[in-house]
Image (cartoon, rainbow, N blue to C red):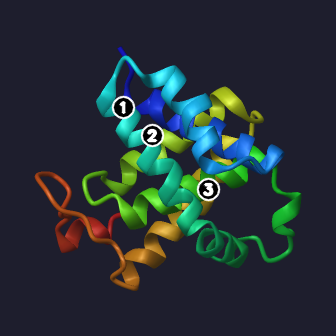
Amino acid sequence: MSSRREARERAMQGLYALEMTNSEPEYIINSILRSRLSADPESLEFAISLFIRTIEHSAEADEIVSRYTRNWELSRIALVDRILLRIGIAEMLAFEDVPPKVTINEMIEVAKGFSTARSGQFINGILDAVLTDLRSANRLKKRGRGLIEMKSDSNED
């Protein structure tokens, strides 16, 4: 049985393939996402949505990340780390049903399996700062049980 973690990993792999091959997104969806997640329609739907939304938010995500890496060119960040940061930001902005802390933790865990030993810390630091700024700008639109944070909770991060 697939899970959202696996869906995130497949979306990351699809985005990596997109960067490396410049293939059409539909081809990547069929060859990487559908072929590997076909047994779990819910995970497949999540992976496809995450893949597409990450593409849609890539330019904005890169701009946001650039604010936190002033002395470090975006192109110098490992591609997997850049993709995970894009996924994390897209998930925070476009997925109302996913708590931001879950997003951050998932990106850290995926980084542990697919990137460098220090990637988890790097991704955590950037996404934590992004979360703080998105909250301050009132850009988080989270709904559902356990997703609406109390004002006192948002000051504890």
Indicate the position of residue 105 as horizontal and vertical percent values: 46, 42
SS for tag 2?
A: helix
Does the CB distance between marks 1 and 2 fall below 8 Å? yes
In the picture of the structure, the residue carrying the numbered disc 3 is 85
Query: What amino acid is at disc 2?
Result: Ala
Indicate the position of residue 46 as horizontal and vertical percent values: 37, 41
The residue at the far bottom in this view is: 137
The answer for how far apart the CA atoms under marks 3 and 2 are is: 16 Å
Pick whichever of labels 3 and 2 is earlier in the sequence: 2
Query: Which disc number belongs to residue 43?
Result: 1
Q: In this picture, is 89 found above or below 24?
A: below
Residue 61 picture quarter: bottom right
Pick whichever of labels 1 and 3 is earlier in the sequence: 1
Identify which residue, 125 or 104, lies in the foreground: 104
Q: Residue at x 25, y 53 (%)?
A: 97
The answer for how far apart the CA atoms under marks 1 and 2 are is: 6 Å
Indicate the position of residue 10 as horizontal and vertical percent values: 56, 32
Label 2: how many Cα within 10 Å (few below 14, some 14–19, many 20+): many
Identify which residue, 109 or 15, lies in the foreground: 15
In the picture of the structure, the residue carrying the numbered disc 2 is 47
Q: Residue at x 20, y 64 (%)?
A: 149
Identify which residue, 1 or 122, lies in the foreground: 1
Query: What amino acid is at disc 1?
Result: Ser
Query: What amino acid is at disc 3?
Result: Leu
Q: In this view of the protein, can residue 21 be seen by the observer?
A: yes
Q: Residue at x 86, y 69 (%)?
A: 73
